[in-house]
């Protein structure tokens, strides 16, 4: 029943009830109207209940990592989901201070959830440096992708309180020892392509406030004893361990120098250019095109700068008596359960040349599968002249989300344009 109409009819009944009573209508008729009026009130109650349940999301239970105040408490780990069907629609929310036992708690969490590769979204003020680096090594061991952001649960109750919810990520911070945990990600994003975290911040600082013994928990008792009998301080030894950790993770150790120059009560936030130069965050877009001899000809190829992209490689080549120009798209397979997912879920391959997009339909593609990847041969007759003179190329896919989507691109320098031209002249 329409809410406004219900309220209007009940108001009319209340008016008629007062008017008729004033005219001394029969008692039985008045009682009948009383009954009708009470019935109308009962119809209004559900509307009030629904409105109330939609506004009481704060009273609904939330995973520990999404509770109010979790940022200030010891780090906890919770599974989160946007309820989408992409591999990044589910992630691990890691929120709070990093304590000495945080790595052990994370191991227990992984065993309980039976997880290996996954997305980890960090929101932490830092804490134990030793535990932060141990967490980072666990992230790398399990091939995890690290992001920075605060995970929260949005609750929309309709049929009953707390019955409808989804999780989302917003900008967050990863500071102090959390920054070193972040570096452990096999792929690392501060500004994530998967979650709205463009205002997230990654902060470094020195771990010493002047005490030569600070950081001693990272060393064995024998190492501390040896240092005390030498001219080195514990702080210097721990700095050496941080440098070794950065190198182990493939990060330029100059970040340690930048952190050491920042007082422990401040934070140093690397710029986007510094994060790229020091390999702190994974690159975006496509790498520089490279050439390789193949059979009697030549191929030119590029790969995404990040290792978790659905797109794995784009190869330019030509073949056949007529030397038909083609692209070979290699992409990861989604978990669709379909024996031929490309034909089931893909509509077209998209090629953008200086912002103008060309769609090559599925009917024109040659498709094969091997080793968990799909190989799509894309004819590009008529496009090579545009491609070899382009300033920017992008490759994407028009497909159902269950297949996995990608949109990767990059600027073309003169060397890359020449390499593409050679691939389409030296056919295999």
Image (cartoon, rainbow, N blue to C red):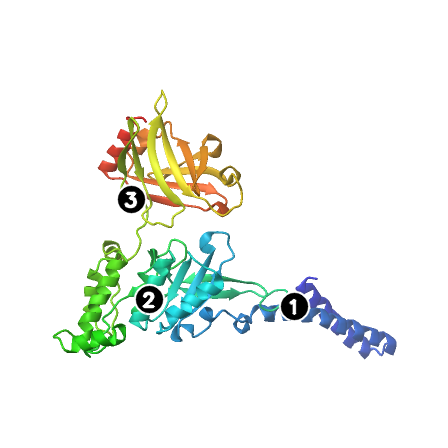
Residue 26 visible here: no
Looking at the rendered image, the quarter that the C terminus falls into is top left
Residue 204 rendering spot, x and y as whole percentages: 26, 67
Report which residue position mark 1 lands on: 47
Report how far apart the C-alphas of labels 1 and 2 lie in the structure: 53 Å
Report which residue position mark 3 lands on: 287
Q: Residues within 10 Å of mark 3 (few under 14, many from 20)?
A: some
Q: Looking at this view, is 222 or 286 the one in front?
A: 222
Report how far apart the C-alphas of labels 2 and 3 lie in the structure: 31 Å
Report which residue position mark 2 lands on: 134
Q: Seen from this angle, which residue lies furthest top?
A: 321
Q: Considering only vertical position in the picture, is 351 above or below 114?
A: above
Q: Is mark 2 on a helix, strand or loop?
A: helix
Looking at the rendered image, the quarter that the N terminus falls into is bottom right
- Is 171 left, or right, of 336 in this rendering? left
The numbered mark, 1 or 2, whose residue comes first in the sequence reads 1
Name the image quarter holding residue 134.
bottom left
- For the point 27% across and 42% down, the residue is 288
Disc nearest the viewer among 2 and 3 = 2
Q: Looking at this view, is 321 or 372 the one in front?
A: 372
Report how far apart the C-alphas of labels 1 and 3 lie in the structure: 57 Å
Q: Looking at this view, is 66 or 243 the one in front?
A: 243
Residue 348 rendering spot, x and y as whole percentages: 46, 37
Q: How crowded is mark 1: few (under 14 residues within 10 Å), some or many (20 or more)?
A: few
Q: Seen from this angle, which residue lies furthest front?
A: 222
Name the image quarter holding residue 211.
bottom left
Residue 417 rendering spot, x and y as whole percentages: 26, 35
């Amino acid at each position: 029943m329409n809410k406004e109409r219900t309220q209007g009819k009940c108001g009319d009944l209340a008016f008629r009830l007062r008017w008729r009573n004033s005219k001394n209508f029969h008692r039985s008729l008045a009682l009948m109207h009383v009954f009708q009026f009470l019935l109308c009130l009962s119809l209004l109650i559900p509307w009030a209940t629904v409105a109330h349940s939609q506004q009481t999301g704060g009273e609904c239970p939330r995973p520990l990592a999404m509770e109010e105040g979790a940022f200030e408490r010891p780090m906890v780990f919770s599974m989160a989901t946007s309820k989408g069907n992409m591999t990044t629609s589910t992630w691990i929310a890691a929120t709070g201070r990093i304590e000495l036992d945080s790595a052990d708690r994370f191991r227990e969490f992984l065993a309980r959830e039976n997880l290996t590769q996954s997305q980890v979204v960090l929101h932490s003020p830092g804490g134990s440096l030793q535990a932060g680096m141990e967490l980072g090594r666990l992230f790398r061991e399990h091939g995890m992708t690290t992001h920075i952001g605060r995970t929260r649960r949005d609750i929309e109750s309709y049929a009953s309180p707390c019955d409808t919810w989804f999780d989302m990520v917003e900008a967050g911070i990863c500071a102090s020892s959390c920054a070193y945990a972040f570096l452990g990600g096999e792929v690392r994003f501060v500004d994530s392509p998967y979650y709205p975290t463009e205002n997230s911040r990654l902060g470094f600082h020195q771990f010493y406030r002047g005490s030569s013994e600070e950081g001693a928990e990272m060393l064995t008792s024998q190492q501390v004893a040896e240092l005390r009998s030498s001219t080195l301080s514990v702080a210097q030894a721990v700095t050496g361990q941080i440098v070794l950790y950065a190198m182990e993770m493939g990060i330029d150790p100059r970040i340690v120098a930048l952190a050491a120059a920042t007082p422990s009560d401040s934070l140093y936030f690397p710029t986007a250019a510094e994060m790229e130069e020091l390999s702190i965050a994974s690159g975006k877009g496509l790498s520089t095109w490279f050439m390789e001899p193949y059979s009697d000809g030549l191929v030119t190829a590029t790969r995404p700068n990040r290792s978790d992209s659905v797109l794995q490689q784009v190869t330019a080549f030509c073949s056949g008596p007529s030397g038909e120009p083609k692209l070979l798209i290699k992409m990861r397979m989604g978990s669709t359960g379909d024996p031929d997912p490309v034909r089931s879920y893909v509509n077209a391959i998209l090629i953008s040349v200086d912002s103008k997009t060309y769609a090559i339909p599925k009917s024109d593609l040659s498709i094969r599968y091997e080793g968990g990847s799909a190989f799509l041969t894309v004819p590009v007759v008529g496009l090579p002249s545009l491609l070899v003179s382009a300033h920017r190329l992008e490759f994407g896919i028009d497909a159902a989300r269950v297949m996995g989507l990608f949109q990767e691109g990059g600027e073309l320098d003169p060397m890359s344009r020449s390499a593409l031209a050679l691939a389409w002249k030296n056919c295999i």
